[in-house]
Image (cartoon, rainbow, N blue to C red):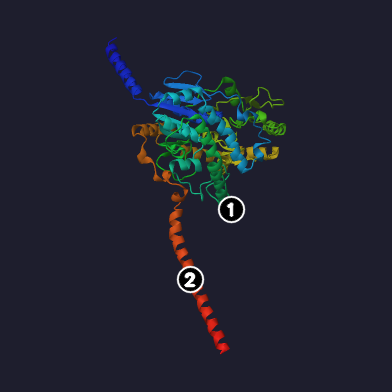
Protein backbone atom coordinates (compact mmCIF):
# COMPACT_ATOMS: atom_id res chain seq x y z
CA UNK A 1 0.00 0.00 0.00
CA UNK A 2 2.94 2.32 0.61
CA UNK A 3 3.60 2.43 -3.13
CA UNK A 4 -0.03 3.25 -4.06
CA UNK A 5 0.44 7.07 -4.33
CA UNK A 6 3.51 6.63 -6.51
CA UNK A 7 1.71 4.09 -8.71
CA UNK A 8 -1.30 6.42 -9.00
CA UNK A 9 0.90 9.32 -10.11
CA UNK A 10 2.76 7.06 -12.56
CA UNK A 11 -0.53 5.79 -14.02
CA UNK A 12 -1.86 9.34 -14.32
CA UNK A 13 1.25 10.49 -16.19
CA UNK A 14 1.04 7.44 -18.45
CA UNK A 15 -2.57 8.22 -19.32
CA UNK A 16 -1.72 11.86 -20.01
CA UNK A 17 1.20 10.82 -22.19
CA UNK A 18 -0.99 8.40 -24.14
CA UNK A 19 -3.64 11.07 -24.59
CA UNK A 20 -1.09 13.59 -25.84
CA UNK A 21 0.34 11.04 -28.27
CA UNK A 22 -3.15 10.20 -29.51
CA UNK A 23 -4.10 13.85 -29.91
CA UNK A 24 -0.93 14.44 -31.95
CA UNK A 25 -1.58 11.43 -34.14
CA UNK A 26 -2.23 11.81 -37.84
CA UNK A 27 -5.48 11.01 -39.60
CA UNK A 28 -4.45 8.34 -42.09
CA UNK A 29 -6.35 6.68 -44.94
CA UNK A 30 -4.79 3.48 -46.32
CA UNK A 31 -6.05 1.77 -49.50
CA UNK A 32 -5.15 -1.86 -50.24
CA UNK A 33 -7.78 -2.79 -52.82
CA UNK A 34 -6.70 -6.17 -54.18
CA UNK A 35 -8.26 -9.58 -53.67
CA UNK A 36 -4.81 -11.16 -53.29
CA UNK A 37 -4.34 -11.75 -49.56
CA UNK A 38 -0.55 -11.54 -49.74
CA UNK A 39 -0.63 -7.93 -50.93
CA UNK A 40 -2.57 -6.86 -47.85
CA UNK A 41 -0.38 -9.01 -45.59
CA UNK A 42 2.58 -7.01 -46.89
CA UNK A 43 1.43 -3.79 -45.23
CA UNK A 44 -0.75 -5.07 -42.40
CA UNK A 45 1.88 -4.99 -39.62
CA UNK A 46 2.90 -1.49 -40.70
CA UNK A 47 -0.68 -0.19 -40.47
CA UNK A 48 -1.20 -1.79 -37.06
CA UNK A 49 2.05 -0.27 -35.84
CA UNK A 50 0.89 3.19 -36.94
CA UNK A 51 -2.36 2.69 -35.01
CA UNK A 52 -0.43 1.52 -31.95
CA UNK A 53 1.52 4.79 -32.02
CA UNK A 54 -1.68 6.81 -31.72
CA UNK A 55 -2.41 7.55 -35.36
CA UNK A 56 -6.03 7.27 -36.49
CA UNK A 57 -5.84 4.66 -39.27
CA UNK A 58 -8.73 3.96 -41.65
CA UNK A 59 -8.12 1.06 -44.04
CA UNK A 60 -10.03 0.27 -47.23
CA UNK A 61 -9.43 -3.39 -48.08
CA UNK A 62 -11.03 -6.75 -48.73
CA UNK A 63 -9.62 -8.11 -45.45
CA UNK A 64 -11.12 -6.42 -42.38
CA UNK A 65 -9.70 -7.28 -38.98
CA UNK A 66 -11.45 -10.08 -37.11
CA UNK A 67 -10.84 -8.40 -33.76
CA UNK A 68 -11.24 -4.75 -32.92
CA UNK A 69 -7.99 -2.74 -32.78
CA UNK A 70 -7.67 0.64 -31.11
CA UNK A 71 -7.29 3.55 -33.59
CA UNK A 72 -7.88 1.13 -36.49
CA UNK A 73 -11.06 1.28 -38.60
CA UNK A 74 -11.91 -0.99 -41.55
CA UNK A 75 -13.91 -0.03 -44.62
CA UNK A 76 -14.62 -3.36 -46.30
CA UNK A 77 -14.50 -4.07 -50.01
CA UNK A 78 -16.81 -6.94 -50.95
CA UNK A 79 -15.97 -8.78 -54.16
CA UNK A 80 -18.55 -11.04 -55.76
CA UNK A 81 -15.78 -13.34 -56.99
CA UNK A 82 -12.04 -13.60 -56.83
CA UNK A 83 -10.28 -13.26 -60.17
CA UNK A 84 -7.82 -15.98 -59.23
CA UNK A 85 -10.50 -18.34 -57.90
CA UNK A 86 -11.23 -19.45 -61.46
CA UNK A 87 -7.63 -19.00 -62.52
CA UNK A 88 -6.62 -22.28 -64.17
CA UNK A 89 -2.85 -22.09 -64.15
CA UNK A 90 -2.45 -25.05 -66.48
CA UNK A 91 -4.17 -23.51 -69.48
CA UNK A 92 -4.04 -19.71 -69.15
CA UNK A 93 -1.04 -18.23 -67.43
CA UNK A 94 1.41 -20.54 -69.18
CA UNK A 95 0.39 -19.46 -72.67
CA UNK A 96 0.26 -15.68 -72.32
CA UNK A 97 2.56 -13.52 -74.42
CA UNK A 98 4.25 -10.58 -72.69
CA UNK A 99 1.66 -8.13 -74.09
CA UNK A 100 -1.21 -10.44 -73.06
CA UNK A 101 0.30 -10.68 -69.59
CA UNK A 102 0.27 -6.88 -69.36
CA UNK A 103 -3.35 -6.83 -70.53
CA UNK A 104 -4.21 -9.41 -67.88
CA UNK A 105 -2.91 -6.91 -65.32
CA UNK A 106 -5.62 -4.50 -66.48
CA UNK A 107 -8.26 -7.20 -65.98
CA UNK A 108 -7.00 -7.65 -62.42
CA UNK A 109 -6.10 -4.09 -61.41
CA UNK A 110 -8.82 -1.96 -63.00
CA UNK A 111 -11.78 -3.63 -61.22
CA UNK A 112 -9.98 -3.06 -57.91
CA UNK A 113 -9.61 0.64 -58.65
CA UNK A 114 -13.28 0.88 -59.63
CA UNK A 115 -14.37 -0.99 -56.50
CA UNK A 116 -12.67 1.60 -54.30
CA UNK A 117 -13.81 4.66 -56.25
CA UNK A 118 -17.46 3.61 -56.36
CA UNK A 119 -17.59 2.68 -52.68
CA UNK A 120 -20.36 4.74 -51.02
CA UNK A 121 -18.13 5.68 -48.08
CA UNK A 122 -15.42 7.08 -50.35
CA UNK A 123 -18.00 8.88 -52.48
CA UNK A 124 -19.47 10.43 -49.35
CA UNK A 125 -16.03 11.65 -48.27
CA UNK A 126 -15.40 13.21 -51.67
CA UNK A 127 -18.74 15.03 -51.65
CA UNK A 128 -18.48 16.19 -48.03
CA UNK A 129 -14.96 17.56 -48.34
CA UNK A 130 -13.43 15.16 -45.79
CA UNK A 131 -9.66 15.57 -45.41
CA UNK A 132 -6.81 13.35 -44.22
CA UNK A 133 -3.26 14.06 -43.16
CA UNK A 134 -1.86 11.11 -45.07
CA UNK A 135 -2.93 8.72 -47.83
CA UNK A 136 -1.14 5.36 -48.04
CA UNK A 137 -1.80 3.33 -51.18
CA UNK A 138 -0.24 0.33 -52.88
CA UNK A 139 1.69 1.55 -55.92
CA UNK A 140 0.61 -1.11 -58.38
CA UNK A 141 -0.77 0.80 -61.39
CA UNK A 142 -3.53 2.47 -59.39
CA UNK A 143 -3.02 6.04 -60.61
CA UNK A 144 -6.65 7.04 -60.08
CA UNK A 145 -6.19 6.26 -56.38
CA UNK A 146 -2.91 8.18 -56.10
CA UNK A 147 -4.73 11.30 -57.31
CA UNK A 148 -7.15 11.07 -54.36
CA UNK A 149 -4.44 12.62 -52.17
CA UNK A 150 -5.08 15.93 -53.95
CA UNK A 151 -8.79 15.85 -53.10
CA UNK A 152 -8.24 14.81 -49.49
CA UNK A 153 -5.49 17.45 -49.10
CA UNK A 154 -3.26 14.62 -47.88
CA UNK A 155 0.41 13.73 -48.11
CA UNK A 156 0.99 10.63 -50.23
CA UNK A 157 2.99 7.49 -49.40
CA UNK A 158 3.24 4.48 -51.69
CA UNK A 159 3.72 0.88 -50.62
CA UNK A 160 5.13 -1.66 -53.04
CA UNK A 161 4.86 -5.37 -52.27
CA UNK A 162 7.64 -6.29 -54.74
CA UNK A 163 10.21 -3.47 -54.77
CA UNK A 164 10.37 -1.00 -57.63
CA UNK A 165 9.82 -1.05 -61.37
CA UNK A 166 9.76 1.50 -64.21
CA UNK A 167 6.31 2.78 -63.18
CA UNK A 168 7.30 3.36 -59.55
CA UNK A 169 10.61 4.85 -60.67
CA UNK A 170 8.70 7.48 -62.63
CA UNK A 171 6.64 8.48 -59.60
CA UNK A 172 9.68 9.54 -57.55
CA UNK A 173 12.34 10.10 -60.23
CA UNK A 174 14.24 6.94 -59.38
CA UNK A 175 16.84 5.53 -61.76
CA UNK A 176 17.13 1.85 -62.71
CA UNK A 177 19.88 1.29 -65.30
CA UNK A 178 18.72 -1.37 -67.75
CA UNK A 179 22.25 -2.70 -68.11
CA UNK A 180 22.12 -4.45 -64.73
CA UNK A 181 18.65 -3.99 -63.21
CA UNK A 182 16.24 -6.53 -64.72
CA UNK A 183 12.55 -5.94 -65.34
CA UNK A 184 10.35 -7.22 -62.52
CA UNK A 185 8.46 -9.45 -64.95
CA UNK A 186 11.59 -11.07 -66.39
CA UNK A 187 13.62 -14.13 -65.34
CA UNK A 188 16.90 -12.18 -65.50
CA UNK A 189 19.46 -11.28 -62.83
CA UNK A 190 21.86 -8.35 -62.48
CA UNK A 191 24.53 -10.35 -64.38
CA UNK A 192 23.29 -10.05 -67.96
CA UNK A 193 25.07 -10.84 -71.21
CA UNK A 194 24.33 -8.95 -74.43
CA UNK A 195 21.35 -11.10 -75.41
CA UNK A 196 19.83 -10.74 -71.93
CA UNK A 197 20.37 -6.97 -71.91
CA UNK A 198 18.63 -6.83 -75.28
CA UNK A 199 15.73 -8.86 -73.86
CA UNK A 200 15.58 -6.61 -70.79
CA UNK A 201 15.47 -3.51 -73.00
CA UNK A 202 12.69 -5.01 -75.11
CA UNK A 203 10.57 -5.84 -72.02
CA UNK A 204 11.13 -2.35 -70.63
CA UNK A 205 10.03 -0.65 -73.86
CA UNK A 206 6.97 -2.91 -74.10
CA UNK A 207 5.98 -2.13 -70.50
CA UNK A 208 6.51 1.60 -71.07
CA UNK A 209 4.30 1.60 -74.17
CA UNK A 210 1.60 -0.43 -72.44
CA UNK A 211 1.64 1.77 -69.35
CA UNK A 212 1.57 5.02 -71.29
CA UNK A 213 -1.02 4.15 -73.92
CA UNK A 214 -3.18 1.47 -72.29
CA UNK A 215 -3.01 1.46 -68.49
CA UNK A 216 -2.79 5.21 -67.80
CA UNK A 217 -5.71 6.10 -70.10
CA UNK A 218 -7.81 3.38 -68.44
CA UNK A 219 -7.02 4.79 -64.99
CA UNK A 220 -7.75 8.33 -66.13
CA UNK A 221 -11.17 7.31 -67.44
CA UNK A 222 -12.02 5.78 -64.05
CA UNK A 223 -10.80 8.91 -62.31
CA UNK A 224 -12.95 11.20 -64.48
CA UNK A 225 -16.00 9.02 -63.90
CA UNK A 226 -15.88 8.80 -60.10
CA UNK A 227 -13.94 11.84 -58.83
CA UNK A 228 -15.07 15.50 -58.89
CA UNK A 229 -13.46 17.60 -61.60
CA UNK A 230 -10.01 18.66 -60.33
CA UNK A 231 -8.15 21.89 -60.91
CA UNK A 232 -4.76 20.15 -61.13
CA UNK A 233 -3.59 17.97 -64.07
CA UNK A 234 -4.01 14.22 -63.54
CA UNK A 235 -0.42 13.42 -64.56
CA UNK A 236 0.88 15.81 -61.89
CA UNK A 237 -1.42 14.61 -59.11
CA UNK A 238 -0.41 10.97 -59.60
CA UNK A 239 3.28 11.79 -59.02
CA UNK A 240 3.00 13.80 -55.81
CA UNK A 241 4.60 11.11 -53.60
CA UNK A 242 6.44 12.08 -50.45
CA UNK A 243 7.73 8.54 -49.92
CA UNK A 244 7.64 5.01 -51.33
CA UNK A 245 8.23 2.02 -49.05
CA UNK A 246 9.65 -0.93 -50.96
CA UNK A 247 9.30 -4.51 -49.79
CA UNK A 248 12.86 -5.38 -50.76
CA UNK A 249 16.39 -5.53 -49.31
CA UNK A 250 19.73 -5.59 -51.07
CA UNK A 251 20.85 -8.73 -49.23
CA UNK A 252 18.19 -10.78 -51.00
CA UNK A 253 17.87 -8.88 -54.28
CA UNK A 254 20.74 -6.72 -55.54
CA UNK A 255 22.58 -3.54 -54.57
CA UNK A 256 21.14 -0.70 -56.64
CA UNK A 257 20.56 3.08 -56.58
CA UNK A 258 17.60 4.72 -54.88
CA UNK A 259 16.51 8.33 -54.51
CA UNK A 260 16.28 9.53 -50.86
CA UNK A 261 12.51 9.00 -50.57
CA UNK A 262 12.56 5.40 -51.80
CA UNK A 263 13.14 3.25 -48.71
CA UNK A 264 13.77 -0.52 -48.54
CA UNK A 265 11.70 -2.23 -45.82
CA UNK A 266 11.83 -5.85 -47.01
CA UNK A 267 10.45 -8.30 -44.44
CA UNK A 268 8.36 -5.74 -42.55
CA UNK A 269 5.37 -8.08 -42.70
CA UNK A 270 7.07 -10.72 -40.52
CA UNK A 271 6.41 -10.94 -36.79
CA UNK A 272 9.83 -11.48 -35.32
CA UNK A 273 8.64 -13.81 -32.58
CA UNK A 274 7.05 -16.96 -34.11
CA UNK A 275 3.67 -17.99 -32.74
CA UNK A 276 2.83 -21.43 -31.40
CA UNK A 277 1.64 -23.80 -34.13
CA UNK A 278 -1.72 -25.61 -34.00
CA UNK A 279 -1.34 -28.90 -32.13
CA UNK A 280 -2.05 -31.17 -35.13
CA UNK A 281 0.53 -29.38 -37.29
CA UNK A 282 3.11 -29.47 -34.49
CA UNK A 283 2.65 -33.23 -34.02
CA UNK A 284 2.92 -33.89 -37.76
CA UNK A 285 6.11 -31.83 -38.05
CA UNK A 286 7.76 -33.45 -35.04
CA UNK A 287 6.86 -36.97 -36.27
CA UNK A 288 8.92 -36.67 -39.49
CA UNK A 289 11.99 -38.95 -39.36
CA UNK A 290 14.25 -36.71 -41.49
CA UNK A 291 12.27 -33.48 -41.43
CA UNK A 292 9.44 -31.67 -43.19
CA UNK A 293 8.95 -30.22 -46.65
CA UNK A 294 6.53 -27.30 -46.90
CA UNK A 295 4.78 -26.80 -50.26
CA UNK A 296 2.66 -23.77 -51.15
CA UNK A 297 1.77 -21.94 -54.37
CA UNK A 298 0.79 -18.83 -52.41
CA UNK A 299 -2.54 -17.06 -52.03
CA UNK A 300 -3.31 -16.34 -55.69
CA UNK A 301 -2.65 -19.73 -57.27
CA UNK A 302 -4.82 -22.52 -55.92
CA UNK A 303 -3.43 -26.06 -55.79
CA UNK A 304 -6.96 -27.36 -56.19
CA UNK A 305 -7.03 -25.77 -59.67
CA UNK A 306 -4.02 -27.75 -60.84
CA UNK A 307 -4.67 -30.31 -63.53
CA UNK A 308 -5.13 -33.95 -62.55
CA UNK A 309 -1.81 -34.68 -64.24
CA UNK A 310 0.12 -32.17 -62.14
CA UNK A 311 -1.55 -33.27 -58.92
CA UNK A 312 -0.69 -36.89 -59.75
CA UNK A 313 2.98 -36.00 -60.33
CA UNK A 314 3.14 -34.11 -57.05
CA UNK A 315 1.58 -36.96 -55.09
CA UNK A 316 3.87 -39.51 -56.75
CA UNK A 317 6.94 -37.51 -55.78
CA UNK A 318 5.76 -36.82 -52.23
CA UNK A 319 4.85 -40.46 -51.66
CA UNK A 320 8.35 -41.54 -52.74
CA UNK A 321 9.96 -39.30 -50.09
CA UNK A 322 9.01 -41.68 -47.29
CA UNK A 323 11.44 -40.30 -44.70
CA UNK A 324 9.95 -36.81 -44.98
CA UNK A 325 6.54 -35.42 -44.07
CA UNK A 326 5.01 -32.88 -46.43
CA UNK A 327 2.76 -29.93 -45.57
CA UNK A 328 0.77 -29.00 -48.68
CA UNK A 329 -1.39 -25.87 -48.91
CA UNK A 330 -4.40 -27.41 -50.64
CA UNK A 331 -7.69 -25.51 -50.67
CA UNK A 332 -10.13 -28.45 -50.63
CA UNK A 333 -10.72 -30.49 -47.46
CA UNK A 334 -10.09 -33.76 -49.34
CA UNK A 335 -7.44 -34.86 -51.80
CA UNK A 336 -8.22 -38.29 -53.34
CA UNK A 337 -5.15 -40.55 -53.29
CA UNK A 338 -3.31 -38.36 -50.77
CA UNK A 339 -0.15 -40.12 -49.52
CA UNK A 340 0.02 -40.85 -45.80
CA UNK A 341 3.05 -38.59 -45.33
CA UNK A 342 1.13 -35.55 -46.66
CA UNK A 343 -0.83 -33.09 -44.46
CA UNK A 344 -3.18 -30.77 -46.38
CA UNK A 345 -4.80 -27.55 -45.23
CA UNK A 346 -6.35 -24.56 -46.99
CA UNK A 347 -4.24 -22.32 -44.75
CA UNK A 348 -0.92 -22.55 -42.93
CA UNK A 349 0.75 -19.96 -40.69
CA UNK A 350 3.57 -19.88 -43.21
CA UNK A 351 6.17 -17.82 -41.38
CA UNK A 352 5.64 -19.83 -38.18
CA UNK A 353 5.94 -23.08 -40.17
CA UNK A 354 9.23 -21.97 -41.73
CA UNK A 355 10.52 -20.95 -38.30
CA UNK A 356 10.28 -24.56 -37.08
CA UNK A 357 13.73 -26.23 -36.94
CA UNK A 358 12.40 -29.51 -38.34
CA UNK A 359 11.24 -27.86 -41.59
CA UNK A 360 14.08 -28.49 -44.04
CA UNK A 361 12.80 -27.27 -47.42
CA UNK A 362 10.28 -24.83 -48.89
CA UNK A 363 8.79 -25.67 -52.31
CA UNK A 364 7.44 -22.31 -53.42
CA UNK A 365 5.91 -20.47 -56.35
CA UNK A 366 8.52 -17.77 -55.75
CA UNK A 367 6.29 -14.94 -54.52
CA UNK A 368 8.36 -12.21 -52.90
CA UNK A 369 6.75 -12.50 -49.45
CA UNK A 370 7.43 -16.25 -49.49
CA UNK A 371 11.00 -15.69 -50.68
CA UNK A 372 11.63 -13.15 -47.93
CA UNK A 373 10.20 -15.50 -45.30
CA UNK A 374 12.47 -18.29 -46.55
CA UNK A 375 15.48 -15.99 -46.16
CA UNK A 376 14.27 -14.68 -42.79
CA UNK A 377 14.12 -18.25 -41.44
CA UNK A 378 17.16 -19.51 -43.41
CA UNK A 379 15.34 -22.19 -45.42
CA UNK A 380 16.52 -23.38 -48.86
CA UNK A 381 13.95 -23.47 -51.65
CA UNK A 382 12.82 -25.31 -54.74
CA UNK A 383 11.14 -22.67 -56.90
CA UNK A 384 8.24 -23.30 -59.30
CA UNK A 385 7.48 -19.80 -60.68
CA UNK A 386 4.19 -19.21 -62.48
CA UNK A 387 3.88 -15.49 -63.38
CA UNK A 388 4.91 -11.85 -62.79
CA UNK A 389 7.91 -11.37 -60.44
CA UNK A 390 8.05 -15.04 -59.40
CA UNK A 391 10.47 -15.91 -62.23
CA UNK A 392 12.80 -13.11 -61.14
CA UNK A 393 12.68 -14.14 -57.46
CA UNK A 394 13.45 -17.79 -58.23
CA UNK A 395 16.27 -16.77 -60.60
CA UNK A 396 17.79 -14.77 -57.73
CA UNK A 397 17.50 -17.72 -55.34
CA UNK A 398 19.46 -19.80 -57.85
CA UNK A 399 22.03 -17.07 -58.42
CA UNK A 400 22.58 -16.63 -54.69
CA UNK A 401 22.89 -20.39 -54.19
CA UNK A 402 20.08 -21.20 -51.75
CA UNK A 403 17.66 -22.74 -54.24
CA UNK A 404 17.00 -24.42 -57.57
CA UNK A 405 14.25 -23.95 -60.14
CA UNK A 406 11.76 -26.38 -61.66
CA UNK A 407 9.89 -25.49 -64.84
CA UNK A 408 6.22 -25.31 -63.87
CA UNK A 409 5.19 -25.61 -67.51
CA UNK A 410 6.67 -29.02 -68.11
CA UNK A 411 8.07 -30.62 -64.96
CA UNK A 412 8.13 -34.40 -64.64
CA UNK A 413 8.23 -36.56 -61.53
CA UNK A 414 11.93 -37.26 -62.05
CA UNK A 415 12.78 -33.57 -62.49
CA UNK A 416 10.89 -32.50 -59.38
CA UNK A 417 12.26 -35.28 -57.21
CA UNK A 418 15.81 -34.67 -58.41
CA UNK A 419 15.52 -30.99 -57.48
CA UNK A 420 14.11 -31.80 -54.03
CA UNK A 421 16.78 -34.43 -53.29
CA UNK A 422 19.53 -32.11 -54.53
CA UNK A 423 18.56 -29.31 -52.14
CA UNK A 424 17.84 -31.62 -49.20
CA UNK A 425 20.98 -33.75 -49.44
CA UNK A 426 23.54 -31.21 -50.66
CA UNK A 427 24.46 -29.13 -47.58
CA UNK A 428 25.60 -26.15 -49.64
CA UNK A 429 22.01 -24.92 -50.09
CA UNK A 430 21.16 -24.86 -46.37
CA UNK A 431 24.56 -23.31 -45.65
CA UNK A 432 24.02 -20.57 -48.20
CA UNK A 433 20.49 -19.91 -46.89
CA UNK A 434 21.95 -19.33 -43.42
CA UNK A 435 24.62 -16.96 -44.78
CA UNK A 436 22.10 -14.81 -46.66
CA UNK A 437 19.78 -14.86 -43.65
CA UNK A 438 22.59 -13.48 -41.50
CA UNK A 439 23.21 -10.70 -44.03
CA UNK A 440 19.51 -9.86 -44.07
CA UNK A 441 19.19 -9.77 -40.27
CA UNK A 442 22.25 -7.55 -39.82
CA UNK A 443 20.27 -4.29 -39.76
CA UNK A 444 20.27 -1.48 -37.16
CA UNK A 445 16.48 -1.68 -36.75
CA UNK A 446 13.60 -3.87 -37.82
CA UNK A 447 12.04 -3.09 -41.22
CA UNK A 448 8.70 -2.06 -39.70
CA UNK A 449 10.44 0.38 -37.30
CA UNK A 450 12.26 1.86 -40.27
CA UNK A 451 8.96 2.27 -42.13
CA UNK A 452 7.36 3.97 -39.11
CA UNK A 453 10.32 6.33 -38.70
CA UNK A 454 10.22 7.54 -42.30
CA UNK A 455 6.42 7.81 -42.29
CA UNK A 456 6.47 10.05 -39.24
CA UNK A 457 9.47 11.93 -40.67
CA UNK A 458 7.34 12.83 -43.70
CA UNK A 459 4.48 13.89 -41.40
CA UNK A 460 6.78 15.99 -39.22
CA UNK A 461 8.31 17.78 -42.19
CA UNK A 462 5.05 18.41 -44.09
CA UNK A 463 5.73 16.02 -46.94
CA UNK A 464 9.53 16.31 -46.81
CA UNK A 465 9.84 18.09 -50.18
CA UNK A 466 13.61 18.36 -49.57
CA UNK A 467 13.85 14.59 -50.17
CA UNK A 468 12.31 14.67 -53.64
CA UNK A 469 14.60 14.74 -56.65
CA UNK A 470 13.92 17.12 -59.54
CA UNK A 471 13.83 14.19 -61.98
CA UNK A 472 10.20 13.48 -61.09
CA UNK A 473 9.20 16.74 -62.80
CA UNK A 474 11.06 16.04 -66.06
CA UNK A 475 9.49 14.47 -69.12
CA UNK A 476 11.15 11.65 -71.05
CA UNK A 477 13.12 13.95 -73.37
CA UNK A 478 14.36 16.18 -70.54
CA UNK A 479 15.19 13.29 -68.19
CA UNK A 480 17.39 11.60 -70.79
CA UNK A 481 18.85 14.90 -72.07
CA UNK A 482 17.72 14.06 -75.59
CA UNK A 483 17.26 17.77 -76.39
CA UNK A 484 20.81 18.52 -75.24
CA UNK A 485 22.18 15.59 -77.23
CA UNK A 486 20.25 16.82 -80.26
CA UNK A 487 21.83 20.28 -79.95
CA UNK A 488 25.36 19.01 -79.23
CA UNK A 489 25.41 16.42 -81.97
CA UNK A 490 22.58 17.53 -84.22
CA UNK A 491 23.89 21.12 -84.61
CA UNK A 492 27.38 20.16 -85.82
CA UNK A 493 25.90 17.40 -87.96
CA UNK A 494 23.46 19.86 -89.53
CA UNK A 495 26.34 22.30 -90.13
CA UNK A 496 28.36 19.55 -91.82
CA UNK A 497 25.37 18.66 -93.99
CA UNK A 498 24.94 22.31 -94.98
CA UNK A 499 28.66 22.61 -95.78
CA UNK A 500 28.50 19.37 -97.76
CA UNK A 501 25.42 20.59 -99.64
CA UNK A 502 26.99 23.95 -100.45
CA UNK A 503 30.22 22.23 -101.48
CA UNK A 504 28.30 19.94 -103.80
CA UNK A 505 26.52 22.92 -105.32
CA UNK A 506 29.84 24.76 -105.81
CA UNK A 507 31.51 21.72 -107.31
CA UNK A 508 28.59 21.24 -109.68
CA UNK A 509 28.73 24.92 -110.62
CA UNK A 510 32.46 24.79 -111.21
CA UNK A 511 32.10 21.56 -113.17
CA UNK A 512 29.27 23.12 -115.18
CA UNK A 513 31.41 26.16 -116.08
CA UNK A 514 34.25 23.87 -117.08
CA UNK A 515 31.97 21.92 -119.39
CA UNK A 516 30.72 25.15 -120.99
CA UNK A 517 34.28 26.38 -121.51
CA UNK A 518 35.32 23.07 -123.11
CA UNK A 519 32.32 23.18 -125.45
CA UNK A 520 33.24 26.71 -126.52
CA UNK A 521 36.82 25.64 -127.17
CA UNK A 522 35.65 22.70 -129.31
CA UNK A 523 33.41 24.98 -131.37
CA UNK A 524 36.21 27.42 -131.96
Q: Neighbour class for label 1 at 10 Å: few (<14), some, many (≥20)?
A: few
Q: Earlier in the sequence, mark 1 or mark 2?
A: 1
Q: Is residue 449 above or below residue 278?
A: below
Whether residue 408 is visible to the viewer of this picture, yes or no, is no
Whether residue 229 is visible to the viewer of this picture, yes or no, is yes
Look at 58% across and 39% down and name the residue there: 388
User: How many discs mark residues in the rendered view?
Assistant: 2
Q: Quadrant of the C terminus?
A: bottom right
Q: Neighbour class for label 2 at 10 Å: few (<14), some, many (≥20)?
A: few
Q: Secondary structure at mark 1?
A: helix
Look at 48% across and 29% down and name the residue there: 31
Residue at the extreme top of the image, as rendered: 1
| Inter-mark Cα distance, 1 to 2 | 43 Å
- Foreground mark, 1 or 2, reads 2
Q: Is residue 284 above or below residue 461?
A: above
Q: Secondary structure at mark 2?
A: helix
Q: x, y (%) of residue 160?
A: 49, 35
Q: Is 489 in front, or is 180?
A: 489
For residue 80, what is the image quadrant? top right
Q: x, y (%) of residue 60?
A: 49, 25
Q: Which mark is residue 415?
A: none
Left or right, 388 with respect to 472, comes to: right
Q: Which mark is residue 195?
A: 1
Look at 45% across and 65% down and name the residue there: 495
Report which residue position mark 2 lands on.
502
For residue 424, what is the image quadrant? top right
Query: Contact (CB < 8 A) between labels 1 and 2?
Result: no
Q: Is 62 in front, or is 491?
A: 491
Q: x, y (%) of residue 405?
A: 61, 41
Amino acid sequence: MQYLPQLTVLLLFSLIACRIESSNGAKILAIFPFTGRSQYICGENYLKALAARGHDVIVISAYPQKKSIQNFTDVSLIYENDLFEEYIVDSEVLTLSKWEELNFAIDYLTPSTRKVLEHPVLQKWLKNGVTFDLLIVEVLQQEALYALAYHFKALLIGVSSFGTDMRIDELVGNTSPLSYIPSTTSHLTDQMNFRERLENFYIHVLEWIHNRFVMLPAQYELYKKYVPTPTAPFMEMRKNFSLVLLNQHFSMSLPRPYVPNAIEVGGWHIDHKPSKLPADMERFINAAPKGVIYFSLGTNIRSRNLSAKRRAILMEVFASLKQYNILWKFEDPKLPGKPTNVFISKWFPQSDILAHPNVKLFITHGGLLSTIEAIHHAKPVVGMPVFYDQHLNVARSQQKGFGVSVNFRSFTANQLKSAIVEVLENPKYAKRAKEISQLYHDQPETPVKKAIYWTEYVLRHKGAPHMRVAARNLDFIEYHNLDVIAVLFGGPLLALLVVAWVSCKLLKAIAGRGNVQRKKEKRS
